[in-house]
Structures are given as structure tokens and as C-alpha cells.
Image: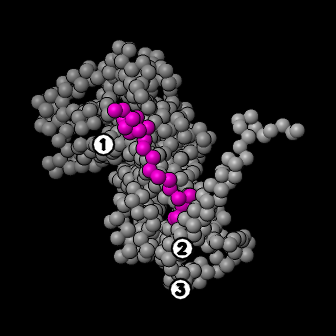
Amino acid sequence: MSTSVERFDERARRGADRVGQTVVRRGELLRHPVYTRVLHWLVAITFILSLLTGFAIYSPWLYPWLTPLFGGGPMTRFLHPWFGVFFDVFFLFQFFNWFVPMSWTKTDSRFVRHVGEYATNKEKLEPEDTGFFNGGQKLYFWAIAASALLFLVTGLFLWFDHVVPRWLVALSYVVHDIAALVMLAGFVVHLYEGTAAQPGTFRSMTSGTVTRAWAWTHHPAWYRDVTGRDPRADYESALRRRDERARAVEAWEREQDARERGLDTGPGGPPPPE
Amino acid sequence: MSEPRMFQIQEISAHPGPVPGRGTQRAVQVAKYIDVTTCIGCKACEVACVEWNDHPFRETTFDNTYQTMASTEWNYWNLIKFSEQERDGNLMWLMRKDQCMHCEDPGCLRACPADGAIVKYENGIVDFQQEHCIGCGYCISGCPFDIPKFKQETKKVYKCTLCSDRVGQGLEPACIKACPTGCLHFGTKDDMVALAQTRSRQLREESGFANAGVYDPQSIGGTHVIYVLHDAARPELYGLPANPTIPPSYTVWKWLAKPAGLLMAMLGIVAVFFHRVTVGPKLPQPETEPPAEPQPDTVEAARKEKP
């Protein structure tokens, strides 16, 4: 099965690259091809729509705020399951697309154990064995996979509540809620990590590329795989070059300052022409 | 389907904050009294219900009993359920008028996520307001008596209103009005309970039904429709649950865990915001500008300046 899925994904990626394109400039690396980006945003849009319609029904305190966005209570109720179905369908494609790079390894367990140091920025560079995805991203992926399955099963029970027993509807109600809260927690972190917490990440899902510095900082093992170069060595040399450049700029500025002081014309600005 | 402001409302489904006007009006608790021992299964109450509510007629079903159809429907709120049981080797042909029980703690209202779709009046009547109903069907799973019925075409749920439109005008419900044997009565809950107890005592002492009693299940705070049963110890014989309960999803989970979940979600958003403010972003390394010498913060600097 996995081979036919891989063949399908391969074809899909090639097809998407024929329709759209990813421009990789000098000093950049291709992070996400067109197919992945389109899937990501289809999943994201249907997820946010499901989240908003779902939370309208979830809490009486959100109901009056969120239902007007979707044309009232009955329309919100009507739309929610369909948003959910589309979310699940799109995520299924993303699941197959990412199934392989998301497989869990010892590296990820170590990453999760040391997530505290990662979150507090004690360590500026991620561990050298961090691949295309880190442990946190994989954790989020599998949480979505599990939640999507739970959403689908319990959602169908809630949708077709007249054909399943009463206790099953009542149970599904709780499970659906718990899955939603897990997803929401993950989503808040995902949104933050993808934008404000890690500058340079968001563009990987829009234009599809990242800078080399981003790659050796956040995903060193992936950087090694795609460039064949040592991420730490490249970081060190970039660091050296930067410091040299800074020293050169400083020297130039000092020189410039000295020259200006030599031609000092006082606070009145340049002297009037004679 | 009555006028929403006919009675003072006591509870509103999925309503954020308190109910306006709750407790500002004196209202007697009403109740319907049904004595199954004197019901003759004439179905006058069924007809009266359909007539008063102007329901479109629906086809009946025949399943080798006298029963009009299998269960109540969105346009058939009142149904006599026929049940054949044995007692001391003799046939007991039990007839019970089935309709909304108007629970003191209504499971439908607990389950409902739509603001104002289900209300409970101070007098105990539980009423659906279809204009606010979103058609999710949670009330169906919240009800211990399988009463709310979904109408597919309009995606709304319907059930007995206890003739709140009639009661509001000082009339008794249509089913009560139509009953020819006097097995149905309507009045204050206290009066109906007293009547039911008198009748049960009579059945126990004079008619040989040693287990006769009142069905007013306290597991849901009592109901505003009470039964006198031949055998109150076995309400299952009549198709009634002995201990009707609301699923804990709609009581414990909804009213405790849901606000807790929302609080957690809010704390999460606050947490990432303040993570950005305090810890700050993780930049691609090396950062383009080398960090400056550590700057003393202003308080620290001011302290150092003092002798």
C-alpha cells in the first residue's frame, strides 16, 4: 500500500509543480513544494472554519459572538459538519504526503524531553540530529492525525444521532470536545511557532523556501541532507564572517567619524558659501 | 410553539449569564395527573392534541396492537402506549398516555447548545422555541424519555408544550379536556401529587394492587407529568425508566469542563503572547547584528549611581 501511496504523492507533487512554481533564490533552500503548500492551506482554512463554527456550538459564551459570522445558529450547525468533512479529506492527503518524514525516531523522543531548553531559547541552535521535522512538529502532526480520526468517528455519531444509541451520542459529545481542546492547544503553539516565535518560518509555507541560516539553525540534519555540507561548520564560518564584517564596518565608521571631526563646522551646519 | 413571553422564564438553554426576570414573579407549579388504572385507551387525548395544535395528519402504523404508531412524532405529541403484561396468570393490558414529562431538571435543556431554543417557565413547563433551534438534535440524546422528535424538512425539533398556549389563558391542556374517564387531571403540582397519593392508597387498600404508587422520578428532580401506576416498583412494565437520568456529558462535562476548557485555551493564548514578550523569538543563527554589551536596566543603573 505504501508504495502506491508514494507513487500517488510523487505524481501529485509533480503535477502541482507543473501548475505552480517555487522560485529558489541564491542562499535559499526549497522547504515545501507547491503540493504541500496547497494542502497545508486547505487544511488550515477548513480547520479554522471548523474551529469557529465548532466553538460557536461549544460554549454559550461564544455562541452569540461566533454564530453571526456564519449566518446564524442553524447555518452554523449546517456548515460545521461539512467543514469538518473537508478538513478530514484534505488532512488525509497531507497525512499520506507527510507520513514518511513524520515517522517518530529516538531523536524526537530526546527533543521532547529537552523541549524546555528549546522553548526558553537557552540553546540557540537546535540539536544537530534534528531532521526535516523536529519532535514538537511530529507530536503536533500525530495529535492532529489522532484528533482527525476521533473527530470523524464521533462527528458522524453526532451528525447521525437518530440512528445511533443515546449513550453513544452523549459520549461522542465529550470525546469531540476533548479532541477539539487538544487541537486548539496545538494550534495556538503551531501558529506562534510558525510566525512570531521563529522569524523566517512563515515564508516556507507561502513562497516555499527558507534561508540557509534558517535551515542550519532549526533543522541541521535536514540541511546536511540537502546541501551535503556540515551545518555547524557553516554556522561557525557565517559567525566568523559576520564578526569580521562587523569589525570592518566599525573601523570604517571610526574612520568616517574622524574625518568628519577633522572637518568640524560647528553646530550651525555647513559653512555658507563665500 | 407558544408565545415566548406568556410565562416568566426560569431557565434558558445555553444562555450566557442569568435569566432576565427570573424569580421576579410568583408562579404556581403546574402538573398533569395521569391515572393509568382508569385509562380505557380511547385515544381521545391523541385526537384532541392533534386538533388543538393543528397538526397535519400522518399515517398510522399497525403492529398487532391497539397502538396508533410506534412512538410519538414531531406532529404527534400524545400517544397511548399499549403493553401486555401478566399478573398472577392473568393478562394486564396496560395503557399509558406517553408525552413530554416536563422534567424539573430537563435533559433536553441541559444538552441544548442554542441560546433560547429551549426554555423552562417558572410554572415548570418546558417549551421549545423553534425559531432559535439550530437542529443539532442534542436534546434528543439528552432526554431520558425519548420525546423530542426531529423534523427532517425544517431541521427543527418538536414536542408536547403542555399546551402552554392554553394554560397561559387559564385553560387546561387539550388532552385533559378530552378525557372521558377522568383519568387525566390538571392543576398545581401539590394538588396533583395529593390526588395521586389518595388514588394510590385507594388502589393499595381497596383494589388489591399492593405496589400501586406515584411515578414522579426524583432522579431528575420530579416531573410535571405524574402517573399513578398499578405497580410503581416496576415502571419498566409501562415503558418508563425506573431512574431516568441525564447523561453526565450534559451536566458535569458541559457546565464544569467546558468553561475550564475555554479558560485553558485563553491561558494558552496569553502564554504564547508573553513568551514572545519575555523569551522572544528564536532567530536564524548567527543573528545579522552581533549582540551589544549587556546593558544595565534602568532600575539597576539608577541604583548604582546612588552613593
What secondary structure is found at the residue carrying circle 3? helix
Write the start and end of the magenta stretch as one range.
Answer: B285-307
Residue that numbered label 3 is attached to: A3
What secondary structure is found at the residue carrying circle 2? helix
Disc assigned to residue A237: 2
Location of the C terminus of chain B by quadrant is top left
The answer as to whether the residues below labels 1 and 2 share one chain is: no
Q: Are marks 1 and 2 in contact (CB under 8 Å)?
A: no
In three-dimensional space, the C-alpha distance between marks 1 and 2, rounded to whole angstroms, equals 60 Å
Q: Estimate the x, y position of residue A154 in percent, counting from the top left.
A: 43, 58
Q: Quadrant of residue B34?
A: top left
Chosen colour scheme: one colour
Nearest to viewer (mark 3 / mark 2): 2
- Category of crowding for the residue at label 2, using alpha-carbon neighbours closer than 10 angstroms: few (below 14), some (14–19), many (at least 20): few
- Decide if residue B228 is in sight here: yes
In three-dimensional space, the C-alpha distance between marks 3 and 1, rounded to whole angstroms, equals 47 Å
Residue that numbered label 1 is attached to: B252
Q: Nearer the viewer, residue A59 or A270?
A: A270
Q: Within the magenta stretch, is there residue B44?
A: no
